[in-house]
Amino acid sequence: MGRLRSYVSKLLICMAVLAVKQALPDRSFTIDYDSNTFLKDGQPFRYVSGSFHYSRVPAFYWQDRLDKMKMAGLNAVQTYVIWNFHELKPGEFNFDGDHDILSFLKKANDTGLAVILRPGPYICGEWDLGGLPAWLLNIPGIVLRSSNDLYMAHVTEWMNFFLPKLRPYLYVNGGPIIMVQVENEYGSYQTCDHQYQRQLYHLFRANLGPDVVLFTTDGPGDHLLQCGTLQDMYATIDFGAGSNSTGMFQEMRKFEPKGPLVNSEYYTGWLDHWEHPHQTVKTAAVCTSLDQMLALGANVNMYMFEGGTNFGFWNGANYPTFNPQPTSYDYDAPLTEAGDPTPKYMAIRNVIGKYLPLPAGPIPPPTKKYAYGVVEMEFTATIYDVLDQLCPYGPIMTDYPITMEAMQQYQGFMLYRTKLPQDYTIANLTVDGIRDRGYVIIDQVWVGTLNRVNATTMNITGSEGMTLDIFVENQGHINYGSGLYDPKGIISNVTLDGAILEKWSIYSLDLDNILPKLQSLHRQGKRKMGNTVQERAPHWRDGGYVPSFYLGSFPNLSAIDPPQDTFLKSSGWTKGQAFINDFNLGRYWPRAGPQVTLFVPANLLRPSPVENTVLFLELERPPCFNQTEACTVEFIDRPIINSTVAARPDETFRDRKYIPEGHDFTNLKH
Ligand SMILES: CCCCNC(=S)N1C[C@H](O)[C@@H](O)[C@@H](O)[C@H]1CO
């Protein structure tokens, strides 16, 4: 009897496990090397995916973009995980709102899109420092993207903190993540350190388990794949339209003789740089190569499918000529920066429809756009009027300049101040290590602009004891290539006629909470100094102008409710930083081009009767500098990101011969 009872109890346990197993069907995502395909739950699976970086679109619009990607026939979405977007300052993490990647993953899963995740730690992506936090640059001896202990200590800490959050979102656990990329085009980087890759492999395995497919991505070249691939990680490639797909995949086959063909970054457009024409890729070329690859049975991820925006200071830069990318990351992608389907979207959808079933139902329409019209921008304060609020803790005193990162600041602007040690009729000011632009100001009068590309020196005039300020803009850390180690601020000594200037006061400038102070000054200004811009902008009287704040009140939003997307046109202004309410919208530089408008997503606007503000920090010359034009901006209902570009926008200012008014230099000895 006892044996029977034992047999029956074992039988019951087996039946219970089976029942649970059946309730949760066996989820698996694997590579079938015999059939050269992926298997999803044991069935052949080919993905057609699009890149969409959650950090470049407000969370408010994530679902809208995912729906449009689904309706294009995609069955997967690819995104980077951007380390510095979650840990801008060491130990200070942000996973809320627009930084809530887990919410993004849930939305993708609910939309029926698999996720191809690329957690780096380096991700390139025309993003500040390729996603690496800039505070790594402050660690003496660190070697980025290598097995260097200093670098790996921080990578390990970050990955051991972050990767476990992904476990519930892995496909085998009921989530959308089917594949995880390790590093990013590592074969294109000079370190070529396989120990680093091995360490990353073990770090990812230790945190994500044995099942998830780990892969690498590299350009389709022997050297690139030699340095970029590693055993146990599936080697994929990337290439753009117009390439011979068969030939490209032959390169991949040298490293993956069997298994599915994968193009992890099929470029649907291309990246832009300030001062260079907007880049586009013809729809026909994109569709021809896409069709070729899908006909070969390849898995394709289109980079980008939704480009979005480099809000705030988040853009990166290219090198060796320092070329920062603009605020728009439209990328000439199938979905515009504002998420609107384009003719390219429709053409790509038709190609996909030849290979995959297209979801029934309408394609979500473009979001509504509204032209809110002209807004008067009134001069409110120079940076000097609010220096105490911009730098509440006061300056750091040093013998010689130190970098922005050493000041524990990782984005934006910094003010370097010293005194002229003697009289100068004409003296050569040299700042070889200006990173990246520097506005030279003597006794609060702008006298010239330096930049790292072609203006690291200029002549100045001044007398002993005058204040020499250099207001430095960090235009975005280099995100690709050998120049990745790119500290900002002033990274060298400053000399006058060859003599090193000493005794510096360095002001770290925080723009995050300046609006209330400016609004109060704006109100005061209206009372004390009259209403016209001219009456209230004394700093123009002497013909010079220093970086200054201009405030405008949005027109009454009751015209339409709820608020709609709009585009902030900066024509007439020179270069600066724009804010909508308290959101850092991004950089504007219409004088350089090609971008003239900034995309303003509707969620940044507050419905009536709340007042909305637009704030400019204009670094150079506002439209009303000559007191004939008005200082205004205009909100229009369409983007302008392909304007003509100025040869070198700085030429018009660089050699400006200016002697600050009210200072008599005629008797100065040299
Ligand atoms: C001009 C050099 C561009 C280097 N970047 C390249 S090739 N790319 C590959 C890179 O992996 C991706 O993040 C993007 O940066 C993409 C360009 O959009």
Image (tube, rainbow, N blue to C red):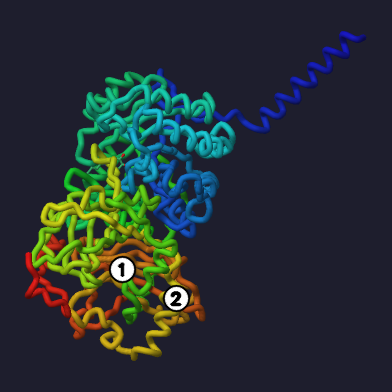
The type of residue carrying mark 1 is Arg
Mark 1 or mark 2, which has the lower sequence index? 2
Q: What's the residue at 43%, 38% (across, down)? A: 119
Is the residue indicated by label 1 positioned so its CB lies within 8 Å of ligand 1? no
**Rendered location of residue 557, percent (x, y):** 45, 79
Q: Quadrant of ligand 1?
A: top left
Split into 4 quadrants, where in the image is the C terminus?
bottom left
Between residues 18 and 662, which one lies in front from this camera angle?
662
Q: Can you identify the residue that label 2 sits on?
A: 612
Between residues 148 and 222, which one lies in front from this camera angle?
148
Q: What's the residue at 38%, 66% (across, down)? A: 600
Number of marks: 2
The type of residue carrying mark 2 is Asn
Disc 1 from disc 2: Cα separation: 20 Å
Tell me where residue 591 sits by quadrant: bottom left
Q: Can you identify the residue that label 1 sits on?
A: 638
Instruction: Say which element carries label 1.
Output: loop
Instruction: Say which element carries label 2.
Output: loop
Residue 365 appears left or right of 572:
right
Residue 644 in sight here? no
**Rendered location of residue 349, percent (x, y):** 35, 48
Vertical placement of residue 143 versus 422, above or below: above
